[in-house]
Amino acid sequence: MIQLPIYLDNNATTPMDPRVLEAMLPYFNEKFGNAASRNHPFGWAAEEGVDYAREQISKLINCSEKEIIFTSGATESNNLAIKGVFEMYAAKGNHIITATTEHKAVLDTCAHLEKLGATITYLEVKADGLIDLNELSNAITDKTILVSIMYGNNEIGVIQPMKEIAAITRSKGVLLHTDATQTVGKIPVDVEADGIDLLSFTAHKMYGPKGVGALYVRRKNPRVKVTAQMDGGGHERGMRSGTLNVPGIVGFGKACEIAMQDMEKDTIRLSAMRDRLEKSLVELEEAYINGNTEHRLPHVTNISFKYVEGEGLMMAMKDLAVSSGSACTSASLEPSYVLKSLGLNDDLAHSSIRFGLGRFTTDEEIDYAIECTKKAVTKLRDMSPLWEMFKDGIDLDAVEWAEH
Amino acid sequence: MAYSEKVIDHYNNPRNVGTLDKAKSNVGTGLVGAPECGDVMRLQIEVDQNNVITDAKFKTFGCGSAIASSSLATEWLKGKSIDQALEIDNMDIVEELALPPVKIHCSVLAEDAIKSAINDYRVKNGMDPIELPKSHH
């Protein structure tokens, strides 16, 4: 018997791995000390937990433990990286390059800096969601201080060519930040091999707890510094003040250790399930996969079911927890800007569903999801005037719609 | 967002989904909304010699609230004269379905669809179209 509803929204957050919870528990009561208390055993025990976690985390992305700055999550890491570089390198320039498909934590941070005098270039992506490397290269000026390009996209899973991007930033002496929130723990990320200078990631997307993340800040070749965005006790090498979230950090460490152990196994299993789901669903007429399918995270697929609206569709799939690029899921009435950046028409963006599989997804759940989605799409199409018009051979683009 | 029970009921058991023959002179068709906006409603009425609506059908591309609003509209239309039908106000739909503020546009669209269907019928049968209030959304 499978248990309903089925969780297929692992890009939003993941359930905690029981092994992570177990590692965290002693740090709530037995080892409750403040990791900054250097003069008694309570502090030492907490510090030991943090140090061990730092090791586990740095191994996963192949950096030194001294290069990990703990934060409250990836949003804070993105803010610290971008605002911190903007302030620290103000003498060198004020130009930052990013892309239109970035997460709001990057886009809104950049928009904020624009008000403070930054010049931001937003690179458009190609129809498959990848940036154009020539465009990136041409966008760099002598005022450019930072390129911030996400590693794997949260909505479509597309993976940007990080090594090639780094080759460009390196050759021009510009720092490279990447929002790797969806990527770390899912595919191998190696800051040395990839050539990344700053990297944001978080625990809760890889079966760890919410409320804890990290920013990797390179210490050698080049030595990177960011201006602290929070004033206080000078924790984390002065880059991020605030008492460390010890249980969260311990859990984050354990999550990284497990991710490293299980990555290969998880990837094989998840991509097989994802591919099976995807293959079955595109058997439906007028169903389209969004984004590049070759350079993509193993556990996610984003599909537009033309002529049905995403939120209406999700309602018919009430036993599946998924998400949609439909406007109706937000108060803004604007469909997903990521999908629109791929050049999708608004109607296709409205019709999209993201399936995010995870470590605890089973084959039975995928069987159920396939059947449930197919039924829902068919039901909604039977109710859709657009589907009927399409079937009658009417060119919907030629119809004069009463816009509202 | 949680849906009201009535929205869920209309969504799970939509009333009067279907198509009437739009070529017939006693059928009025209203097609409102746009695919880019994420809502398209088609509402059709069949009217007898006394200008009473005997049948109503809908098809909707949209969220659950849009589907429920159009389903409810077809229920309310049957048995009303075309003049009475004009009195259906979008706020009646909002109230009946307990739509939250972000979904009020669904009820507005349903009201527009009703008026547009009636006008189609009126024009087909030699009557002047009623003037529609400037779209308020």
Image (cartoon, rainbow, N blue to C red):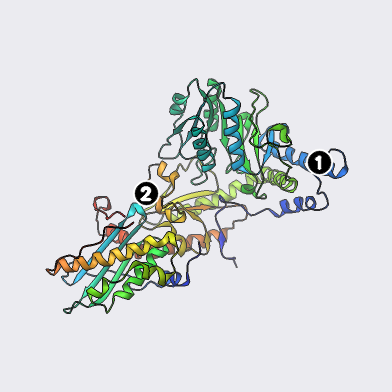
**Does residue A194 appear left or right of residue A23 in this picture?**
left
What amino acid is at disc 2? Asp
Q: Are marks 1 and 2 on the same chain?
A: yes
**Does residue B34 appear left or right of residue A64 in this picture?**
left
Q: Could you tell me how far apart the alpha carbons at marks 1 and 2 are, in whole angstroms?
A: 52 Å
x and y percent of residue A100 in the render? 45, 38
Tag 2, which secondary structure? helix
Residue A195 in sight: no
| A371 vs A114: above or below | below
Q: Where's the C terminus of chain B, which quadrant?
A: bottom left
Q: Nearer the viewer, residue A208 or B110?
A: B110
Q: Residue at x 35, y 57 (%)?
A: A307
What amino acid is at disc 1? Glu
Q: Residue furthest left?
A: B126
Circle 1 residue: A48
Of callouts 1 and 2, which one flags the residue occurring earlier in the amino acid sequence?
1
| A286 vs B91: above or below | above
Number of the label disc, if any, that sits on residue A346: 2
Mark 2 Cα within 10 Å, few/some/many (few <14, many 20+)? many
Which of the 4 image quarters holds residue B72?
A: bottom left
Tag 1, which secondary structure? helix
